[in-house]
Amino acid sequence: MNMIRTLASTLVVAGLAVAAEGIQAQTLEKIAAADKITVGYREAAVPFSYLLAPNKAVGFSVDLTQAIVDDVRARLKKPSLQVDSIPVTGTNRIPLLVNGTYDLECGSTTNTSARGKEVAFSINFFYAGTRLLTKRDSGIKNYPDLANKTVASTAGSTNEKVLKKFAVDHNIDVQIISGKDYADGLKLVETGRASALALDDVLLYGLRANSANPAALEVVAETLQVEPYACMVRKGDPAFKRLVDATITRLMKSGEFTALYKKWFESPIPPAGANLDMAMSDALRANLKKRSDKPAQ
């Protein structure tokens, strides 16, 4: 009897968990009921998502988000669907998505197997790798030069984890401190509180291009790990993931994705008209056809 009671209790708990997940997972229904979609953005992830004015983000990922929102409007037949935007950080972006605070994040988030246990990822839309930003006169050219120095990264980033592992594996005595966001990490280098900043290479180029003195900074070191960026949606909601993937697929097939890439990576961008002059990588060019959502390991 006890066994039967225990089994019944287990099934009830499992059923409630599945039901709860199902209720939360129906993003399109949630959006339709509220007549509103809430999207997350990063405040200093140039050129993906960054602020030009308070609460006004621009960038490659912001344009990608807008294309997805337009397709949500079309799917729900709600042309005047309201869009709310909230800033997210490396530490809160996953919890706030999971708990339903917002519905979609296309920023500069790496698609990893570990994160895939909590959220779902779209087709990969960029491939980056961890490198270092430092002052030109720092003497730092590669990772061994970091010995006995302080290096900044951002809390909760894959870059922080990769750098820590590299330092342990190669017996490099380095102190790693965390900035709250990318802009804070740059400030740590500019003010001399850190000798270098470890982030994805494209973010480093963006930070340098829009810094107070770009000529004083340089991106150095070999690429530690290639990482795919993708949009995040709630796990267990295949319908919404399909919609997001369909938007990205449409843009990649039509050439609109390539045009967006040229706009943000190979042309002058606001606020100062800096040009990252970063050609599309072979990995990304290949994914325009493969359209894989495979995570980094």
Image: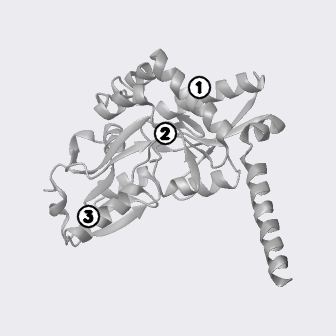
Q: Which amino acid does label 1 sit on?
A: Ala
Specify the label residue 284 is tagged with.
none
Q: Which residue is drawn at 66% across and 37% down?
A: 240
Find the residue positioned furthest to the bottom: 2
Mark closer to the chain start, 1 or 3: 1
Q: In the rendered image of this protein, does residue 136 appear above or below residue 280?
A: below
Q: What residue type is labelled 3?
A: Phe
Q: Residues within 10 Å of mark 2 (few under 14, many from 20)?
A: many
Q: Nearer the viewer, residue 269 or 4?
A: 4
Mark closer to the chain start, 2 or 1: 2
In the image, is 19 to the left or to the right of 217?
Answer: right
Mark closer to the chain start, 3 or 2: 2
Residue 59 visible in the displayed image: no
Read off the residue under disc 1: 67
Structural distance between the alpha carbons of marks 2 and 1: 17 Å
Q: Residues within 10 Å of mark 1 (few under 14, many from 20)?
A: some
| Quarter of the N terminus within the rendering | bottom right
Q: Residue at x 53, y 59 (%)?
A: 91
Q: Which residue is drawn at 55% across and 57% down?
A: 117
In the image, is 110 to the left or to the right of 164?
Answer: right
Q: Is mark 3 on a helix, strand or loop?
A: helix
Specify the label residue 50 is tagged with.
2
Specify the label residue 166 is tagged with.
3
Q: What residue type is labelled 2?
A: Tyr
